[in-house]
Amino acid sequence: MDATAPLVTLVLIVSTSLIATLVCDARQQLHSAALSPSARHPLASWLPKGKSLSSMGRRVLPRLRKKFSSRPMDERLSSVPVFLITNSYALPYLTQVRPGEQTALMFTDPEEANTMLNEMVQTAGPGADARLFVISLEKAWAYARRAEPRRTGIVGEDGKEAVMTFKFHPPQVENAGNYVTLLGRRTKMIPVFEATGLDVTKNGDKLCPLFMDLEDLEAAWERMHRARPDTPPKPKVSVYNLLDVLLHRERQANGLGPWGIVPSSKALDFVKKNRSGGTRKARMIRIRR
C-alpha cells in the first residue's frame, strides 16, 4: 500500500437494513472465483473449456460455443478475480473516504488485499471476523458503475445518512516498471498490458489479449518467440488503464470485438491456494447460489 496515503479507519456497517440488503445481494449476485486445477495458465482461465471453470463459470459454460468476439462484455470479465475484505456474512469492511461516504475497496492484487486484511486482524485482535472474498471483475465493474450509492443507515454528526460506494484500489505497479511511470499515473491506475503482434486464435477468432500482469505477457511472448524465432526477442508493450479500457469497450456495442482480459496467474494461484484451506481470517468464502 502507498506509504504516503492517509491512514483510514476501517468500520463494518451493521445496519439491519444494510445487512439484509447486502446478504440478499451477495447470495443472488456475488459468485466465487475459485478455478479448477486445470486453469493454471492465464490463457486457460481466460478461454476455458468444459470443466476448466468451477462455480464462477457454470452459468457461462452453456454459451462457450459462441465466438469469443461475439460474446458480451460481462462474459469476458467473468473469469477475472477481484478481492474484497468482508465478514463471514459477505458484508464488506468500509473506509471513510470523505464525510458522508463509506467505500468498499476492491483489489485486483490479492497480496495487497491480504496485507490490508492482516493489518486489520492485528489491530482488532484474534476475534476479528474478517476474510477475503472473491468476486468476478464482471460483478466488481457492475458495483463500481452503479449510479446511486447504497444507503448505510449510519447518520453522521451533520444529521445526514452516510452512503456506501464500491471503488477499485489501484495496485502497486512495480512490475510495470517505466511503462506506467512514463504515463505519469503511477498511483492512479490499474494497468493492463498489450504486446504488438501477440494474439491468440480461438475457434477461428484472432483475439488481442490484455494482460493484468506484465510478467504473464512476457512469458507468453517468450513462448511465442521460441516457436517463431523470426519474431523480436522482446515485445513492444503498451499499457492502459483497465477502467478506461472497460469504459471504452462498454460504449462500443457492449464490448464486442476481438479482445479479452487475461487474469493474473498470481491471482489465480492465490485463489486456488486459499479456496479450500488457509487460516480462518484469510480463507475464501464461497456463496451458495
Image (cartoon, rainbow, N blue to C red):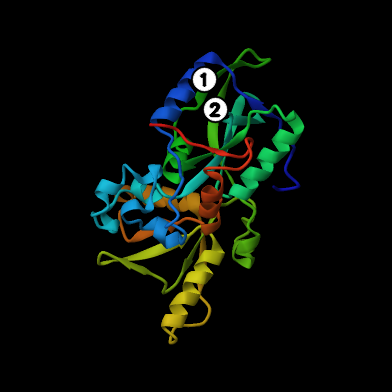
Q: Quadrant of residue 160?
A: top right
Q: Secondary structure at mark 2?
A: loop
Q: Which residue is pictured at 76% across the width and 32% down the height?
A: 123
Q: Quadrant of residue 88?
A: top right
x then y, percent, for residue 221: 48, 74
Q: Which residue is pictured at 43% across the width and 27% down the height?
A: 25
Pick the residue in front: 147 or 111: 111
x then y, percent, for residue 286: 47, 36
Label 2: how many Cα within 10 Å (few below 14, some 14–19, many 20+): many
Residue 243 visible to the viewer: yes
Q: Is residue 72 left or right of residue 240?
A: left
x then y, percent, for residue 209: 41, 63
Q: Quadrant of residue 205?
A: bottom left
Q: Which residue is pictured at 63% across the width and 57% down the height?
A: 173
Residue 237 visible to the viewer: no
Where is mark 1, residue-wise?
Answer: 19
Q: Is residue 235 left or right of residue 279?
A: left
**Residue 91: image tag:** 2
**Residue 274: image tag:** none
Q: Which residue is pictured at 36% across the width and 58% down the height?
A: 47
Q: Is residue 9 above or below residue 203?
A: above
Pick the residue in front: 62 or 38: 38
Answer whether labels 1 and 2 touch (C-beta < 8 Å).
yes
Q: CA distance from mark 1 to mark 2?
A: 7 Å
Amino acid type at circle 2 is: Leu
Label 1: how many Cα within 10 Å (few below 14, some 14–19, many 20+): some
Amino acid type at circle 1 is: Ile
Screen quadrant of the C terminus:
top left
The earlier-in-sequence mark between 1 and 2 is 1
Q: Is residue 168 left or right of residue 112?
A: left
